[in-house]
């Protein structure tokens, strides 16, 4: 295969990273064009940086599993998507180095190991009864709010409260503070916000957790943050600032992503009455497959899997040079026809378990089993308890989060 | 078929346990992979191969001997 040297390409030939969706359920049309040839292509990001876009399922897994890539957001060529017009702010953003997802081994290995036991398959399953209670409470609230027949927003009543309450209880964060952290998270991941507002949201959340961790250090509570303080002191490696960063990341990652999957999955199933009927008739068989298929189909955190190469990597017939940025597009990989027959069809009977919606490699989502549990319970409960559930407006006229790092829907008015 | 699980590489994603809980578990002490059956028979072959494919960290492999 021909080797292409990136330096031979002219900068003005580099297309902009495609972000415009023509249909809310499918990737931007350019993804299919880029895929032809299955060779990584260079794209220009709104930040002014250039990155290799990788779209083939096997290549995405290859680079994300490679030891020669870095997740460190502070590297010069890291594929940042946010616009950063002011060099002074760009410099300040070097502090913006999220815990876990923004660090490399061996530090990442130690940090991840400190918290794995909280998210094992067994520990997550033990949470089922409590998560079911939380979901039942949210659905009660939805039914009560709409008993006069007026449309109710599913996002406000179910999608956001459920994962927010679950992660709050697990971490030991007061749910009463949800308006604060939901607002700051939305700002943080929005492409529309001003850079200084993103920085402020990040600092606000940091200050909040600094205060919370300090209180738990005085009197450790029986929750994830409290347990990590106790374990850290026993091992002699307790680091307050490290825990602040970790807790902040877990809170952000633990509510916004699952909330969007609840909304998108519900809308997609309501739009597909035949598959929804099958799912309602046999949830025990079909729900686990439906959850994986919906995760594949939407891949809401498409470009979180950005990296910088730390050595030359051969991928799909080209060489990505050490120091160059790359985006391993989970959404493109999960729509790769070589990996999934008829990739653009939602098919809840297929085995989609090898999707990369949770990423791949050492950074694969820590909370994936918790996300699966929440989605399973929410879809079962919602479709089971509200047989007449229906969208109050056409799906195509909903407000989708095209302007955010994590895809989703802003509001989903429903009736029944 | 012999399964090799590298606990130094494991990141505790739990994909193997979801795929075949008879063969794989997670250590309650550290969340990393535990092999319940080191040499699973034919019954488990497909599931073990799927678990190896799904493992995100490359901690699982099969020694064909």
Image (cartoon, coloured by chain):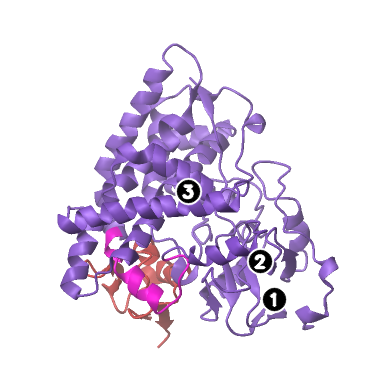
Chain colours: A purple, B red
Q: Which residues are magenta?
A: A100-118
Label located before the other in sequence (1 or 3)? 3
Q: Is residue A191 left or right of residue A355?
A: right
Instruction: Name the secondary structure under disc 3.
Output: helix
Question: Relative to A389, does residue A118 appear above or below in the rendering?
Answer: below
Between A352 and A73, the one nearer to me in the picture: A73
Instruction: Name the secondary structure under disc 2.
Output: loop
Question: Relative to B6, does residue A331 appear above or below in the rendering?
Answer: above
Q: Residues within 10 Å of mark 1 (few under 14, many from 20)?
A: many
Task: Identify the residue position indicated by label 1 in the image.
Answer: A316
Q: Residue furthest top?
A: A148
Q: Chain of mark 2?
A: A
Task: Identify the residue position indicated by label 3 in the image.
Answer: A257
Q: Does the stretch in magenta take in A113? A: yes
Q: Chain of mark 3?
A: A
Quarter of the figure that contains the N terminus of chain B: bottom left
> How far apart are labels 1 and 3 at the CA level?
30 Å
Mark linked to residue A56: 2
Question: Relative to A145, does residue A276 appear above or below in the rendering?
Answer: below
Q: Residues within 10 Å of mark 3 (few under 14, many from 20)?
A: some
Cβ atoms under marks 1 and 2 closer than 8 Å: yes
Residue A147 in view in this figure: yes
Between A237 and A119, the one nearer to me in the picture: A237
Between A91 and A41, the one nearer to me in the picture: A91
């Amino acid at each position: 295969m021909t080797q292409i040297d990136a330096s031979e390409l002219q900068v003005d030939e580099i297309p902009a990273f495609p972000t415009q969706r023509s249909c809310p359920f499918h990737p931007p049309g350019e993804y299919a064009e880029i895929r032809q040839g299955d060779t990584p292509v260079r794209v220009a990001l709104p930040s002014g940086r250039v990155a290799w876009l990788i779209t083939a399922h096997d290549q995405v897994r290859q680079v994300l599993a490679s030891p020669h890539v870095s997740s460190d957001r502070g590297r010069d060529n890291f594929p940042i998507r946010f616009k950063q017009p002011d060099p002074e702010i760009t410099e300040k953003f070097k502090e913006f180095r999220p815990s876990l997802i923004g660090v490399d081994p061996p530090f990442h290995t130690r940090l991840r190991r400190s918290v794995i036991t909280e998210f094992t398959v067994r520990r997550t399953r033990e949470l089922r009864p409590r998560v079911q209670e939380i979901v039942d409470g949210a659905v009660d609230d939805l039914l009560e709010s709409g008993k006069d027949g007026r449309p109710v927003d599913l996002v406000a009543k179910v999608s956001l409260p459920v994962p927010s309450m679950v992660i709050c209880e697990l971490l030991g964060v007061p749910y009463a503070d949800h308006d604060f952290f939901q607002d700051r998270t939305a700002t943080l991941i929005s492409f529309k916000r001003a850079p200084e507002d993103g920085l402020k949201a990040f600092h606000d959340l940091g200050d909040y957790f600094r205060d919370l961790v300090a209180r738990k250090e005085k009197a450790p509570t029986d929750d994830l943050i409290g347990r990590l303080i106790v374990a850290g002191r026993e091992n002699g490696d307790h680091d307050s600032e490290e825990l602040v960063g970790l807790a902040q990341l877990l809170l952000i990652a633990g509510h916004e992503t699952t909330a969007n999957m609840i909304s998108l999955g519900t809308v997609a199933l309501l739009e597909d009455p035949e598959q929804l009927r099958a799912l309602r008739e046999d949830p025990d068989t079909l729900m686990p497959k439906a959850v994986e298929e919906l995760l594949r189909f939407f891949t809401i955190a498409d470009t979180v899997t950005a990296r910088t190469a730390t050595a030359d990597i051969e991928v799909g017939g080209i060489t990505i040079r050490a120091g160059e940025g790359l985006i391993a597009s989970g959404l493109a990989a999960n729509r790769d026809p070589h990996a999934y027959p008829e990739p653009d069809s939602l098919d809840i009977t297929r085995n989609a378990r090898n999707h990369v919606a949770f990423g791949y490699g050492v950074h694969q989502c820590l909370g994936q089993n918790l996300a699966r549990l929440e989605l399973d319970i929410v879809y079962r409960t919602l479709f089971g308890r509200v047989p007449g559930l229906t969208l109050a407006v056409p799906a195509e006229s909903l407000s989708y989060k095209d302007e955010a790092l994590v895809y989703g829907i802003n509001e989903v008015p429903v009736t029944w | 078929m012999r399964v090799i699980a590298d606990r130094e590489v494991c990141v505790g994603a739990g994909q193997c346990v979801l795929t075949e809980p008879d063969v794989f578990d997670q250590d309650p002490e550290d969340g990393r992979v535990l092999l319940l059956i080191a040499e699973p028979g034919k019954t488990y072959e497909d599931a073990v191969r799927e678990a190896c494919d799904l493992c995100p960290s490359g901690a699982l492999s099969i020694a064909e001997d």
